[in-house]
Image (spheres, helix red, strand yellow):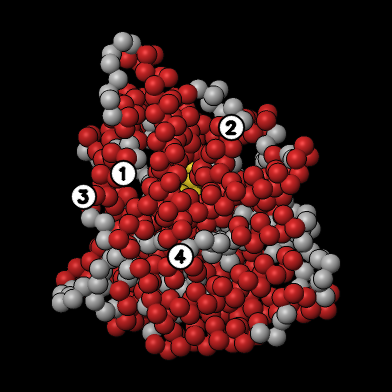
Amino acid sequence: MQKYLFYSLAMAGLISACNTGQKEPGGQGAAADTTQSAAFRAYEDHFIDALWKTYPGWATEMGYHAYDSVLLIPDAAGQQAELAFIKQQEDSLQQYDTSKLAPALQIDYHLIKDRLAGSKWDLEQQKAGEWDPSGYNVSNTFAFILNESYAPLDTRLRSFYSRLANVPAYYAAARQRIKDPVPELTGLAQDQNLGGLSIFEKDLADSVKQSSLSAEEKQQLLARAQTAAKAIKDYAAWLKTLKVEHPRSFRLGSGLYEQKFRYNIQSAYTAAQIYDSAVARKTWVHGEMARISRQLWPKYFGNKPMPADSLAMIKQMIDTLSVQHVKPAEFQQAIEAQLPTLTAFIKEKDLLYLDPSKPLVVRKEPGYMAGVAGASVSAPGPYDKGGNTYYNVGSLQGWAPARAESFLREYNHYILQILNIHEAIPGHYTQLVYANQSPSLIKSLLSNGAMIEGWAVYTEQMMLENGYGNNEPEMWLMWYKWNLRTVCNTILDYSVHVKDMSKEDALHLLTQEAFQQQAEAEGKWKRVSVTSVQLTSYYTGYKEIIDLRKAYQAKLGNQFNLKAFNEKFLSYGNAPVKYIRQLMLSE
């Protein structure tokens, strides 16, 4: 799938979450028209069929394999085909009266409508395909075909072979489309495309050896892969030598930023309102961290005088606790070892049902994914429920000792546990298990990134509220530090892209006000220079979920049950929280 279309799905579509397999809530409302609802469900099937023909790579990654052999060329004709698809679907939606649809289908309607509008806006107004060279990368889908065992190896290799045919034309079209690219995104494109070369060289060769293809088929496949690898190398080399007289700034600007926030985050708030809320949250969290630091000070510093500046006191306490961390070579193993502890705690406290039959594979982050985040989860799509779920962990191999030490102090003994809660259990991994049992393909496919990230942040707080970490003030202090990162993600992203914040001021915010290590802050600056808006999804979703829980608890009073709330919330699928709120509070 081209990165620019259905933009937020580059991440969110792989970590979607829905319900536990029961009938979807809100299936019939008092005002629902069963005829209208039935007609709309039929439309959804037609929409998905058309969606996969338009975005075959996305279909593959979602587990629908009818178009594995197809690689579309991102030229002018391809763009016109995409716009024609959008217009046709927008015209089809006009025949439905949402007031007559069942509540669950109303969410589906808005998800389709909003995503079509966002994709059209990107093509016609944002035009990221002209200035973001990193959007052109074929590696991920080829890696999926090669590595996932959804079909016999020989079948997958033949699809791989057919799909290779258009790789040279794909990159030729990319060169034609790129105009005045962003330098930071140009560098990212080089790194990620070259990082994926092993798929076409080493990984493919290993798979070919294990296959039952004829000698002639093997020879043809490897030869075509060499041609594709050359096209990738040529694209990276072209980007490296490209002379750009007026390169576009990576800063999105106020107008585009608000629009992108509207389409990607789908919040009840504007980007400016979320920014103001994050600034207020930062002040409150600083107060809580100062209170805990004063409580801990005698334990770690005895009678040593506390700094008069509260932020300096907090930083000194955090620095003291951060020396407790694993060795560089043990980072991935430490993550694997901690996951059973999280599972046991959730079962003991009865916070959420966990399906023990779904595997989670911790692996080194693949090269074609490197350069944006240090840890992530990749899940099979709703058509491929038996596929592996991967916890991708960045490697510290080859890092200078000082850089590795800075990174590990950031992901210290306490933070590493919170990271695992967020990324794995009961965060993204748990959520995606629910996703693959969803009765609504629309909610799985058109998933809302803010709901997804917000859930992961919410679960961090939920775990500590229920006693994870034995209520140690050290764990709470470090969680506030981690939560402050979520808050400052929003402040940073908005300030950089809308308010022209300098790198110097950004690093000050992150290191002095969010107490992050230098390596983490440098990495976040790189991330904000190659992405926009997505960093706001964490705080936005978290805020809306916490607000919803408070409202729902107030509504139910003594009847409120945390496990029931968690499972009911997930049962609505990956809809924007604003839609879930309407349904949960109206029932």
Residue type at mark 4 is: Phe
Mark 1 → mark 4, Cα distance in angstroms? 22 Å
Query: Which numbered dot is residue 580?
Result: none
Circle 1 packing at 10 Å, graded few (<14), some (14-19), many (20+), is many
Q: Which residue is mark 1?
A: 510
Q: Which residue is mark 3?
A: 504
Residue occupying the point 56% across, 62% down:
268
Please report contact status of discs 2 and 4: CB closer than 8 Å, yes or no: no
Residue occupying the point 49% across, 85% down:
83
Q: Earlier in the sequence, mark 1 or mark 3?
A: 3
Residue 498 position within the rendered picture, expressed as x and y whole percent measured from the top left: 33, 63
Residue 545 in the figure: left or right of residue 297: right
Please report contact status of discs 1 and 2: CB closer than 8 Å, yes or no: no
Instruction: Name the one closer to the observer, 402 or 317.
Output: 317
Mark 2 → mark 4, Cα distance in angstroms? 31 Å
Residue type at mark 1 is: Leu
Mark 3 → mark 4, Cα distance in angstroms? 25 Å
Residue type at mark 3 is: Glu
Instruction: Name the one closer to the observer, 499 or 92.
Output: 499
Residue type at mark 2 is: Glu
Q: Earlier in the sequence, mark 1 or mark 2?
A: 2
Q: Which residue is mark 2?
A: 465
Q: Earlier in the sequence, mark 3 or mark 4?
A: 4
